[in-house]
Each structure stands twice: as C-alpha cells, then as structure tokens.
Image: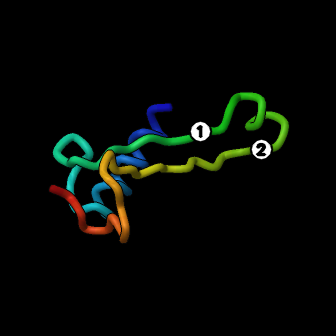
Amino acid sequence: QQEAWTRCGEEFEKYVGGSDDDSERDLNNYQPTKSSGKHWDDRAIQCILYSYEDVTGSLAGSAR
C-alpha cells in the first residue's frame, strides 16, 4: 500500500505540477489484492486523479 501511495504521489506531482496536499485536485489508487497477486501475478497500480469541480479538459498542470 505504501509503495502505491508513494508512486502515485510522485506521478501526481509530475502531471499536475504540485503535491496533492497543496492542490485542489485529489488522488486515490487501486492496488492489486493479495489474491490477484498470488494467482495472476498482478502487480498493476492504477493512480486516479480527480477534481471536485466539473472538468471539461485536461488536469495536466492544473495545481492550484
């Protein structure tokens, strides 16, 4: 879990242009479960960037 949060935080900063702590944007992630890791060798982490406001374009460089 910690690795997922660390990596997603790093990607968030690169994409948005600031940390999720300092941004109006927010960050979450999906991580492999123990079962999917064991049975299917699942190692994928999905980082989710979202806004509480309506968005009509890219969030790249949108740190506020």
Q: In this view, does 37 lie above or below 51?
A: above
Residue 59 badge: none
Q: Residue at coordinates 76% horizontally, 36% vertically from top-left?
A: 36
**Mark 2 or mark 1, which is nearer the start of the sequence?**
1
Percent across and percent down for residue 52 are 32, 45
Q: List the residue tagged with mark 2.
A: 41
Determine the secondary structure under disc 1: loop
Q: Residue at coordinates 20% horizontally, 58% vertically from top-left?
A: 63
| Outermost residue to the right | 39
* Tag 1: amino acid: Gln
Toward the viewer: 14 or 57? 57
Percent across and percent down for residue 49 are 40, 52
Which class describes the residues within 10 Å of circle 2: few (<14), some (14-19), or many (20+)? Answer: few
Residue 31 badge: 1
Q: In this view, does 63 lie to the left or right of 6?
A: left
Residue 33: image quadrant is top right
Determine the secondary structure under disc 2: loop
Q: Residue at coordinates 37% horizontally, 68% vertically from top-left?
A: 56
